[in-house]
Amino acid sequence: MTVTERVELAQNAAGRMVPAMVNGKPQIPYLGVGKYQARGRKAAPPVRSSKDYPENGDKRVPDLETALRKCGLRDGMVISNHHHLRDGDRVALMALQAAAKLGVKDLTWFPSASFPSQKAAIELMQSGVIHRIEGSMNGPLGDYCTQGKMRGMGVLRSHGGRWQAIQDGEVHVDVAVIAAPTADFFGNADGSHGKSACGSLGFALADSIYADNVIVVTDNLVTFPCIPWQIQGNNVDYVVEVDSIGDPAKIVSGTTQITRSPDRLRIAELVARFLRDAGIMRNGFSFQAGAGGIALAFVDFLRRMMKEDGVKARFVRGGSTRYLVDMLQEGLTDYILDGQTFDLEAVKSIASDPRHVPTSPFTSYNYHGKGNFASMVDAVVLGATEVDVNFNGNVVTHSDGRLLHGIGGWQNCLAAGCTILAVPSFRDRIPVIVDEVTTLTGPGELIDVVVTERGIAINPARQDLLDAVKGSRLPIRPIQDIKAEVERICGGNPARPQRGDRPVAIVKWVDGTVLDTVWQVG
Amino acid sequence: MKSSTETREARSAEAGHWGKDTRSDLHVALEPRDSRGFEITLESRVAPYYGDSIVAQTKQVLESLGLKHARVAIHDEGALPFVISARIETAVKRLGLTTLRKALPEQFPLPQPSAQDRLRRSRLYLPGTEPKYFTNAGLHGPDAIILDLEDSVHPAEKDAARILVRNTLRAVDFGGCERMVRINQLPMGLEDLAEVISESPDLVLIPKTEHPQQVAEVDRMIGKLKHRHKIDRAIWLMPILESALGIENVFAIATATANVAALTIGLEDYTADLGVTKTPEGRESLYARSRVVNAAKAAGVQAIDSVFGDVGNVDGLRRWAESSRELGFEGMGCIHPSQIAVIHDAFTPSQAEFEQALKIVAAFEEAQQRGLGVVSLGSKMIDAPVVERARKLVARSRAGARATLKRPEQ
C-alpha cells in the first residue's frame, strides 16, 4: 500500500485523527495513558544450531555484500541500523548500498534514528531499494517524508517503543546490521573502546536478540574474547571488518558546552531551583537530563545546589556528558545509568569506571516489560518544540508540521515522578506555548511542569507540586498567563499553517498504539 | 547609508540587519516609485506564522510615514513588531524625506515614575542596535537597564539606534527596572534626546561630562521636550565622569541641576586619559573614585561605580564590587546578566550588619525616649554619626529586600 491510496482514519482517545491501517498493518488508535492491555507472547527468532556455525568461532566474511547475501536478504525485507555513532555513522549507508548492489528492492529501513549525514538514503528511496523508513527522520529525510515523497508511511517510535515493537512482533527485523567500535570474530561487541568508541550499544541490543539475522561490522577487531561485551556473539551470524565505521569527530563531541545565552541559563537555573524548592532534590534522589544546552546548564546549577545543601543522588540517568561524570567523581551520585554517551570524557568514564553503567532501552524504557527505570526516576528535564495549554507536548514536528526531531527517549521519560519541559517561551518570533500542539507526542497528563524564562507553569493536576513550592520565591504562573504575555510580545497569535490531508507518518505511543498523525506539508 | 540629518532625497535606502548570526532583527531595502503602490517581498523563517502580519505592518508603517508607492525587500530574522517598525522608519528617514512623522508601536503601560534616591545597585547595558537583548532583559532582575546610544553603536548606525531605542522604551516591558538611556556626547546627544524623550525614559546618562554647563544644557533640552510632549514625570540625570578634567569639576557637575540623581565614573576612558593601565584592583583610579563618592555625598546624590569588564571572572567581580561598596558607592554597571546577582549580593548589607544596625537604632531611640544623653550598646558608645550610618544601612537593606520581593523570580 502506498500513501497515495485513500486512508481510512479513526479518532483516538486524544481526539486525533489517525490511520486505521499503516503499511498494510491494522493499527490500534491510542486509548489513553495505561489503557491498552497488551496480550500474547513475545516474538522470537528462529532456533539455530551450533553445527551451522564455525566451531572455532570465526564468523568473519569478507564484506557486507557477502554477509547480506548469506543472510538471504530479498525484496520487501526489514533491515535495521542504530544511531549510537550518531551523525558520524558510516555503517547504515554501507549496508543499504550493499543491499542495492545485490539488486533487492522495497526494503523497510528500520533505524533507531536517522541523521542528516544519511541523506543519500533519499536516492535509495527514489531508486526503489528502500520503500520506507520506520524511525525518526529530520533534515533532508524529514522533508522528503513530509513532502509526501516516500512510498510507504513513516512510523515514529520512542526508544522504548522501538524495543516494544520488536519484542511484540509488530516489527520483524530480517537483518540487523550493528556497527561495533570493538568486536571479536565470534561477534561479541563493545562500544566503549576503539577509535570509533561511542559508549553504550544499547540501541542495538533488541535487534541482536530478536532479528532473524545479525551482522556485526567493526573497525577494531580484537582477538577473542572482546571484553567487555555489550552484544553477545551467540546472537550474531556474521562479522565484517571494515576500515572505518564512522567519523570520530561526529560520533562524540570533543567537549559539550554549556549555553552562554542568558535566557537559557535562566531557564536552567529555574529548573534546578524548582527541584530544590519542591523538595525533589534530596538525599538518595535521581534525575535525568539530556545533552542540550539548557539541560547541561541545569546539571551544572543543580550540582552547585547539591554541594551547598550536602545532597547526594543515588543515580543519574544519561545521556552522559562530562558534567555527569564530574558529579560521579565528586561523589554527588553513586551511579550513572547511561543510555547514550555524548562526549569524550563520558566515553572515557564508561570505559573505565564500573559505576558508570551502560543501559539499554529494555532496562530503561520498554513499556511492555516488568517495569522500567524511567518511572523510577524522580525528575526528568526535557525539551519540546511546542507545549499546549493542556500541557500536551510536541517534539517531532515544527509548528508548520515538518518533521524536526525523533522522539528518542522523550516519551518514555514522561513516566518520571516529575516531568519538566524546559523551553524558551518563544523561538525567533514563534510562541512555544500554543492552544493545541501541532503533533501530539506526549499527553499532558504526564507533563507536570513547564519552565520558561518568563516563569514556571505547574500542571493543575499536580496539586502536590503546587503545594510543595508554595511560599518559595519561584515565579509560578498559570500557563495561560505566560502564553498571553508571549502573544502580546510576538504581536498576536501566530497563523496556523494549512496542513495537508494526507498522512505521511504516524507517531506511536509507548504501548504501540497510534497517538497522532504527521500530515503532508506543502 | 544616509544619516537622518541629511535632507537630500535618495533613490533607495536600507536599514537593519540579517544573516546567519542575526536574531530578532530585520533588514529592509526600500525603493520608492511614482505609482503602482507597494511591492513587498519577504523572506523569513517565521513566514508561515507571521508572514501576512509582517507585510500588513510594513504597509501600514510606510503609509503612516507618507509613502504610497515603493518596492520593499525584507529579510526577517524573527523581528518583533516594535523592531519591524523601527527598521522601516529608519529606512524611510534615510531616504532623506523631510518627514517629522513617526511610526510608533503599540505602547506598553509606563512603569511607576522613578525616585531620585531609588535603589541603583545594578544597571545592565544593552547595545542600542541589538534588539535580541531587549525583550528579556528585565527578566534578569537588574535594578535598571541602559539602552545605549553611545559607544556600543557604530557611527553609521546612530540614527537607527535612536529610533529603535525610542520604540523599545515605548513597547518593551522591563518589569520593575528603571529605564535608562545613555546618549551620545553633546552636541549629538541633543539629537538623541529629541528622539527618545517622548517615551519618558526614567534617567539619562550623559557621557564624558567635564563641565556643569553640559549637564545644564541636557537638562534644558529635556525640560523643553517634556513640555512639548506633556510629560510631567521625572527624568533624572546621571553624568559620567570619564576624564581628569571631569573629575576636577565633579562637585560642580553634581550640583549643576536639581535633576541629577547620581554620578558615575567611566574607567576605560579615565585611565586612558591618565595614560595608565586599568587593573582588576583599580589602584590607579582610587583617587578619582573616592573623589566621585565624596562629591556625590556632598551634593546629596548617589555615587555609582563603573563596570567590571571581565565577564568570566566572577571572583574578581565580587572583590571589585565589595571594595566599591566599602569606598561608598551604591551600585555599579553590568555588561552581562550573570553579573547582576553577584553585584546585588555585594551591595546589599549582610544580615549581621543589618541586625547590628537595627540594634543601634533601637538603642538610640530608647535612650531618646528616656531622655538619656549618652547612648551605649554593650560596651560601645553610640554617637550621632554612628546612628546616622545605621539608619542609612537599614534603609538600604529594606530597599534591597523590597526590590527582591517585587521581583520574586530573582
Image (cartoon, coloured by chain):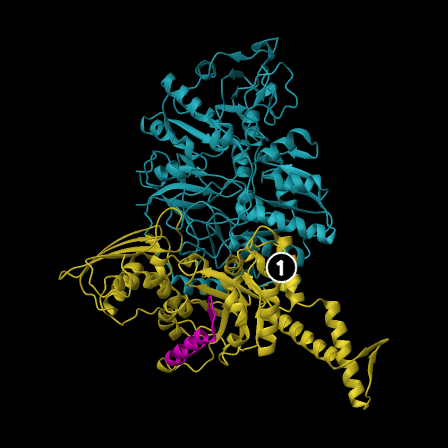
Find residue A336 and report its horizontal and vertical position in percent. Answer: 66, 38
Range of residues picked out in magenta: B203-226
Question: Can you say whether A160 is above or below A183 in the image?
Answer: below
Q: Find residue A246 and report its horizontal and vertical position in percent.
A: 49, 26
Which chain is rendered yellow in the image? B
- Find residue A488 and report its image quarter: bottom left
Query: Chain A in the picture: what colour?
Result: cyan
**Which x, y percent locates residue A189?**
59, 22
Query: Looking at the rendering, in which quadrant would you find the N terminus of chain B?
Result: bottom left
The chain letter for the residue carrying disc 1 is: B
Relative side of B98 to A34, left or right: left
Q: What main secondary structure does the magenta stretch of the protein show? A: helix
Q: Is residue B56 visible?
A: yes
Q: Which residue is mark 1?
A: B342
Identify the residue at horizontal 47%, vertical 33% (top origin): A87
What residue sits 66% from the left and 62% below the top?
Answer: B323
Under tag 1, what secondary structure?
Answer: helix
Q: Is residue A337 left or right of residue A174?
A: right
In this rendering, the answer to whether B129 lies above or below A394 is: below
Instruction: Residue at 45%, 34% (x, y): give it.
Output: A114
